[in-house]
Amino acid sequence: MKIAVIGAGNWGKNLVKNFANLGVLCGVADAVEANLSWVAENFPEVERYQSSDELFTAADLDAVAIATPPHTHCAIAMAAIEKGLDVFVEKPLTLDPNEARLLQQTAVVKGRILMVGHLLLYQPAIQFIKKFIDDGGLGEIYTLTQRRSKLGRVRSVENVLWSFGVHDVAVLLYLVGESPSNVQFSGHAAFTPKVEDDTHLHLEFRSGITANLHNSWYWPRVERELIITGEKGILVFDELNARVVLHRKQVAKDLSHSDEGEELLLEGADQPLIIELKHFLECCEKRQQPISDGQNGYEVVNVLSQA
């Protein structure tokens, strides 16, 4: 299989390195000369192109991975699908739900694999939690609360929900297994007008489940945690330490509560990026639907757009 990466910036370099290690990288396209020089220095055997148009014209490919600025995703991905290529697009799929829907529908019509880089879905702990929930480990699910905050790079165009929260929204929708019936959003813009630095997202689902997400890039601590409350206890995913802990705390029908301690269910994890990229290759080879397919990409962009 032959794959080219379009965009070899900060994150694109990770795709270049991993696809090269997997033995499938045949080309890289980037308009920035410094990025192409880095490719030439580290992967001299890989062909280099100055644009996606040049790549599509000259290269013999099976698929592309796109890691360019989000506002360019739709045009590049659409051109690749029209060329008959399978496509991996870094998150978010697009900035507009209508564009995301169009990409998803076109990929289906053309019989192409379209996968979105919702990396956290490929964290083994998330896959473990999904199975645990679906197998009834928590009984009825009540709420999901997710936090992703730190003192981070402050953007002047996209707010912190679009910057930090894309992966979290993808996880919340994946674990609940349905689209929200109600989306509520609040935030505070301290540094750039109308670009929120601290945000709260509240989702309500027809099943009765609610989900809450807090994101901030102006925060005193690094917080990356998911708490799921359910009928049979409370599940906590400490992403920083890759630990999933079940707190056996329950509330009876008479509203009395019990606490039978806690149990470590999972600790440690493989690197989710290599798992994600291997999944993409497998889906291309077997023509099977990815976990983070075009529909998943659309649902996430739709929630962000509503917020």
Image: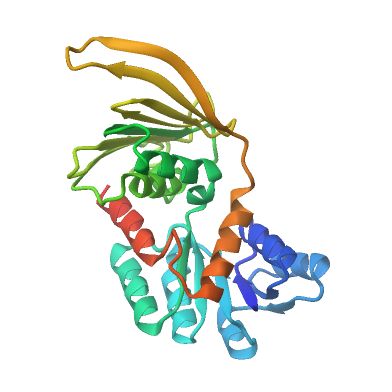
Quadrant hosting residue 294: bottom left
In terms of depth relative to the viewer, which is nearer, 39 or 63? 63
Q: Where, by quadrant of the figure, is residue 280 drawn?
A: bottom right
The quadrant of the image that shows the N terminus is bottom right
Q: Pinpoint residue 133: horizontal percent, then vertical percent.
A: 37, 39
Q: Residue at x 36, y 43 (%)?
A: 134
Q: Viewed as shown, does residue 19 lie left or right of 188?
A: right
Question: In the image, is residue 121 above or below residue 198?
Answer: below
Residue at 17% from the left image edge and 45% from the top image edge? 206
**Residue drawn at x 44%, y 40% as measured from the top left:** 129
| Pick the front one: 120 or 70 | 120
Residue 261 seen in the current view: yes
**Residue pictured at 59% horizontal, 61% vertical:** 277
Which residue is more in the foreground, 36 or 203? 203
* Horizontal side, residue 202 vs residue 133: left or right: left
Q: Position of residue 199 (x, y in %)?
A: 35, 36
- On screen, residue 75 above or below 160: below
Residue 90, relative to residue 188: is it above or below? below
- Residue lying furthest bottom: 57
Give the vertical position of 241 relative to 29 (above or below). above
Q: x, y percentage for residue 148?
A: 46, 35
